[in-house]
Image (spheres, coloured by chain):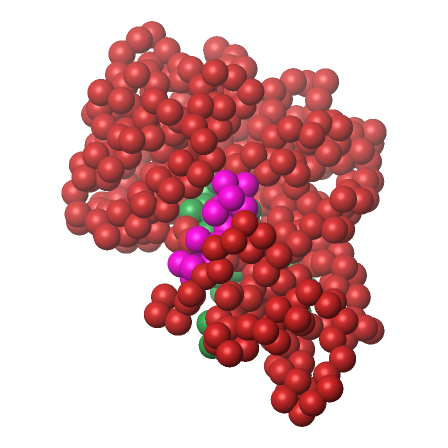
Amino acid sequence: MVLFNTLRGSLSVCDPEELPLVNRFLSEGVFEPVSKEQESFLNRMLELGYAVDDRCDEMEIVRNRKRAGMCDPNRLDIIVLPNMNCNFACPYCYEAHQAGSAMSSEVERRIIAFFEAQIPRFRVLLLSWFGGEPLLNFETVVAVSTAAQDICRRHNVALVGNVTTNGYLVDEQRARILVERGIHNYQITVDGPPEVHNRTRRLRGGGGTFDRVFESITILARTDPRVHVSLRVNFNHQNIDSIPHLLELFDPIVRPSLRVVFEPVFGDHCLSATKNIEAREISDKLFRYYALARELGYDVTQGGLPIGQLVYCYAERENQFIFNHAGDLYKCSVSRFAAEERFGYLNSQGEIVREDGRWQAWFGMDLFDEKCYSCKYLPLCMGGCRRARVEGDATGSYCKLVPTNVSFALKTVAFGSFRELLIANGTEESMSFNTDADSDKELSQ
Amino acid sequence: MTIVRKPKQESQVLAAVKKGADKEKILREMVAKAECCVDHLCGCR
């Protein structure tokens, strides 16, 4: 039997002779020791966080984490969309692209003015480029990143630069320029080997993209040792089985710079992964493919048990802002970015002018929904998708935990394979699992 | 009982959001707790 505490992260494997006592402890809720041996056992449980003193309010600990995460004073998170345009036409894309949309030099100036005023207040700037396809407006990316880098240097603020790009417009010169601006993290999607990728990641005017995207990833990985490329595969029933073949294609030399990320195609449509594949099948395959990727030399970080998560998503932080090409402010990147849905905008001085109604709706709600308080996974999840809560929408990743962009640990909860994750995190030789259907009850918290 | 992992103390959990926290600690936490793929540090853990 394995004990895991979702609040504290303690993970233990019980010896067979301890099982009767542990079972009693777990089933009774209140445990009154009647011998020295039981007292010693209880002390151990207390020390490891499996038992709590009556005076300890664990829910207040969770609420305090959430408040601390939302008000994080050290980290400024900025996502910039220099356009809502894209040169790709992927059938599962949720965005409404606007051909010709592009950030003006005036909006660039306002963002830089915002940076001048705000960056010095923080310890770290996380500057992420998103779109559309951000590199269609390469000059904007360079101009704003250059300014951000300069301000960060002057004020001793760490800069973490990221770009989510389809990779089609990266070449050696551009890779060098981006890396020099502190952009060391990239997310590029490859949906499989050429014949598979080219079915979904197509140019807007038609035509496959695999060769150029593959080349771009290799260029980036070779440009600088600090570069990490999140090699993302959006999978569904049509391509999940091609992942092993894709993993064989990259040169072993660049693999350590490539962090593999397998994400289900999400949404309520016919291409959705979870509408077409059984959750357990997805889970089994992901475990195998991540293990294969690790064997092949890729950077694989999945499989850990993140403890002490403070918020569900970046959009819950008060110091997180998305600026689109028009200088409008949003919170969630899964959005249509319609003007009427903005949370505010940057005025000519680079100050945020909030749309109070939307801002209040976003941040004014309770920290958690009522049902969250009885969920043992709450400390891992921290309350689910805020946008879904605001919109009163019980779909998406909120509560049903349809596994979209949530942590791998939560995906395993949603796929019904959380125990396998615990096994992977434990010492294999000392583990023997109770396989009955109610074994979830054994997970403490 | 074999302890695979010890419990985290609350001071550890909140260390990176303490006012003026060490930059390296904040950066490590950003990687460890990247919430979602838009964090790009991703691999979400």
Look at the picture and state if A69 lies above or below A251.
Answer: below
Image-based side of A177 in relation to B45, left or right: left
Q: Is residue B45 magenta?
A: no
Q: Which chain is red?
A: A
Report the label total. 0
Q: Provide the letter of the chain coloured green.
A: B
Q: Position of residue A65 (x, y in %)?
A: 70, 58
Q: Quadrant of residue A195?
A: top left
Question: Which residue is rendered at x = 66% and y = 71% of the image?
Answer: A24
Q: For the C terminus of chain A, which image quadrant?
A: bottom right
- Does the rendering let one see residue A278? yes
Question: Residue A257's x, y, as percent?
Answer: 29, 49
Task: Pick whichever, A147 or A443, lies toward us.
Answer: A443
Return the x and y of residue A184 as percentages of the image width and height: 38, 47
Which residue range is magenta in the image? A410-425
The answer to whether residue A176 is visible is no
- Residue drawn 40% across the image and 22% down it: A136
- Residue at the bottom extreme of this rendering: A36
* In the rendered image, the vertical position of residue A4 relative to residue A95, given as above or below: below
Residue nearest the observer in this picture, A253 or A22:
A22
Q: Is residue B13 above or below residue A226?
A: below
Residue for point 53% across, 57% down: A306
Q: Quadrant of residue A173 in the image? A: top left
Closer-to-camera residue (A259/A306): A306
Left or right of A262 in this view: A391: right
The residue lying at 46 percent from left, 43 percent from top is: B40
Going by the image, does A37 lie left or right of A125? right
